[in-house]
Image (cartoon, helix red, strand yellow):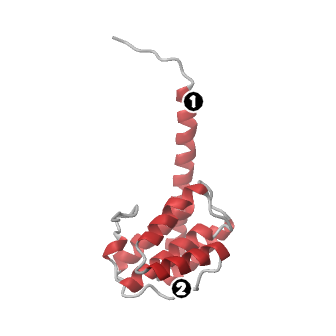
Amino acid sequence: MEFQLTSGLQPQLLEDNQKLWLANAICGAITADGSVAPEELEYLERALSFLPSQADVVKMMQAVKDQKLPQLERFPGATRELEVKIFIDLATVISVDNVLGANEIDYLLYIGRKLGFGREFVRVVIRWASEGIVWKRKMLHLIDAGSSLEAEYTD
């Protein structure tokens, strides 16, 4: 199954070791807050879908269940653009449940270092993710407010 992440990154085009790293990072982002929210399940399915082998899928599922994902090294064979896209995508995964807790921020700081980003760029991305959460919450409020309005059609 082919798909694109938020940044436009297509995991199926990565090398197998890069796919494994990215899947581990996504699963780490999903479990960073200590639980897997229903909104995060889609990302879990996506991460598992591009793993190189069924054995990797089984191993990853167990690691997620146990919340014991392996420590990550630097992303193998990366370009700077690829590292930026991955970091943006991980921030998106972390914020999909509309919550950005302390453990999730710590995870982004950790992953940012693995991708070679300084603290300032990581903070910019965290701020961006936080603004996205606010935007999504306001959108949900607008949907609720607009749904309760009486229609005022004009001809």
Q: Are marks 1 and 2 in contact (CB under 8 Å)?
A: no
Q: Is residue 153 above or below residue 55?
A: above
Q: Disc 1 to disc 2, how far (Cα)?
A: 44 Å
Q: Is residue 113 above or below residue 102?
A: below
Residue placed under numbered mark 1 in the picture: 145
Write down the quadrant of residue 2 in the picture: bottom left
Question: What numbered label is drawn on residue 72?
Answer: 2
Residue 117 in view of the camera:
no
Which amino acid type is shown beneath numbered disc 2? Leu
Q: Nearer the viewer, residue 12 or 153?
A: 12
Q: Nearer the viewer, residue 85 or 57?
A: 57
Quadrant holding the N terminus? bottom left
Q: Residue at x 58, y 85 (%)?
A: 70
29 to the left or right of 151: right
Q: Secondary structure at mark 2?
A: loop
Residue 119 in view of the camera:
yes
Which amino acid type is shown beneath numbered disc 1? Ala
Write down the quadrant of residue 89 in the picture: bottom left
Check disc 2: other Cα within 10 Å, few if <14, some if 14-19, many if 20+: some
Q: Residue at x 62, y 63 (%)?
A: 36
Q: Is residue 79 above or below residue 99?
A: below
User: Residue 147, percent across and down?
Assistant: 53, 27
